[in-house]
Amino acid sequence: MSRIAAIRSSEYLNGVIDRGIEKFEETNRQTIRFNALFGSQAIFNSILGSLTSLASDVFLLILMFCLITLASPAISVLSILIFTSASLLLHFMQRKRAFEVGSQAREMQIQLDSEISQAVEGYRELHVGNKLQAKKIEISSLFIQLGRLNAEMSTLPNLGKYFIEI
């Protein structure tokens, strides 16, 4: 989902830039920034990603409930102990990685916002200096890198669930 969001953000920004200087000047700068940086991420990662995760969680909870009710009480207690210990182990292992990925994503987001601001504010100079294509490639690359980090951040909370399922 994060890769799709990054590609959509990049396509949106390229489309705005390619429309020409007259149309570009008519567009609100804050609208460009929001749509390029947060709009696609919100739709693909937050909404669609959450719905997918919710659907799989509901299915698994129903399945686990049915299986535990059929099992004996001894197996139920043992499975609770195993799942609890695995959860604690994962929590401590993932905490450091989540902090590292979050810090990298924060720095990448600041850099991307800065590049977009420079492109928006210096559009005329980029257009006249024939540097528009290079700026588009640079921004697209940053979107892809940020998409990878966002993908890793969004999968970290689910790793524990998948680990326990295995």
Image: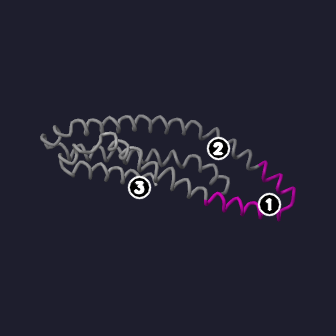
Amino acid type at mark 1: Ile
Please give the range of residues in magenta.
55-81
User: Is 138 in front, or is 43?
Assistant: 43
Label 3: element kind = helix
Do the residues under discs 3 and 2 have CB atoms within 8 angstroms?
no
Residue 68's mark?
1
Tell me what residue is drawn at x 83 percent, y 62 percent.
Answer: 71
x then y, percent, for residue 95: 59, 37
Tell me what residue is drawn at x 62 percent, y 60 percent.
Answer: 56
Give the total of numbered labels. 3
Residue 90's mark?
2
Asked if the magenta segment contains residue 111, the reply would be no
Name the mark nearer the viewer: 1 or 2.
1
How far is the residue under mark 3 from the one under mark 2?
28 Å
**Would you say 95 lies left or right of 31 here?**
right
Residue most extreme to the right: 73
Say few, some or many: other residues with alpha carbon within 10 Å of mark 2 (under 14 / 14 to 19 / 20 or more): some
Label 2: element kind = helix
Residue 4's mark?
3
**Would you say 146 lies left or right of 93 here?**
left
Label 1: element kind = helix
Tell me what residue is drawn at x 30 percent, y 48 percent.
Answer: 13
Name the mark nearer the viewer: 1 or 3.
3
x then y, percent, for residue 42: 46, 48
x then y, percent, for residue 106: 44, 35
Amino acid type at mark 3: Ile
Q: Earlier in the sequence, mark 3 or mark 2?
A: 3
Residue 162, image quadrant: bottom right
